Amino acid sequence: MSGLVISLKADEKFLVNGALLINGSKRSQIRVGSDDVNVLRLSDALHPDEVKTPVRRVYYAAQIYLSGDAPESDIKSEVQTGLTSLAHVFEQTPLMPQIRKAEKAAAAGRFYTLLCALKPLMALEAELLQIAPPSICADDTAPRLIVPNAPAALHVTQARPKNHVVPPRNSRPFDRVETAPQGHPRETLTLIENTA
């Protein structure tokens, strides 16, 4: 089956070319076979008050296009500029494939695919910035991003306490270690590869 396939919960609302539609009383899927149709599930829509970080700004710009509130010509350059900035930030990290996936989707005009690529980064970004994740990530129990071909533990930090112990694989994907030598508190964020 080719094209974009979107799973919908019972009574879930979604936009098709700016028109609001509501799914029936049962869970279903829709397939969008044409490239000129824009679909946005409202459960994937970021509230304007939550657009406070770089990843969220790019996500929101793509969302504006999918909702029919702006033409592609106005949005495409903003998205490309934002993704270029994110590529510089995430360069040399295991998260770079997500950015590359988003860049390819933007270049092809597949903005829903771009949203899917950036959504897990928003949860991780919120964790790193120590802010609340956006409401669209509320269904997730913890931010998860599967990084292919990555070692079991990735340390997202510049400083790590001596004698740092990597948490066991069955722990939460993000664990904080709040001890450091000489009694100075320091926080280390450890990303554990999700093998489930």
Image (spheres, grey):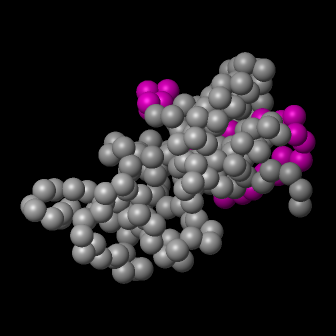
Q: Is residue 189 above or below residue 48?
A: below
- Residues 124 and 179: in front is 179
- Residues 19 and 144: in front is 144
Residue at (88% x, 40% y) in the render:
35
- Residues 76 and 87: in front is 87
Q: Quadrant of the C terminus?
A: bottom right
- Specify start and end residues of the magenta stretch as a single range: 27-52
Q: Is residue 129 above or below residue 51?
A: below
Picture coordinates of residue 66, whole percent (x, y): 71, 32
Residue at (35% x, 60% y) in the render:
189
Residue at (55% x, 56% y) in the render:
93
The quadrant holding residue 9 is bottom right
Picture coordinates of residue 24, whole percent (x, y): 69, 49
Q: Is-magenta flag for residue 169?
A: no
Q: Quadrant of the N terminus?
A: bottom right
**Number of numbered discs present?**
0
Q: Is-magenta flag for residue 28?
A: yes
Picture coordinates of residue 39, whole percent (x, y): 74, 39
The quadrant holding residue 185 is bottom left
Residue at (64% x, 47% y) in the render:
99
Does the image show residue 25? no
Does the image show residue 139? yes
Q: Is residue 132 above or below residue 2?
A: above
Picture coordinates of residue 139, whole percent (x, y): 47, 54
Q: Is residue 141 above or below residue 55?
A: below
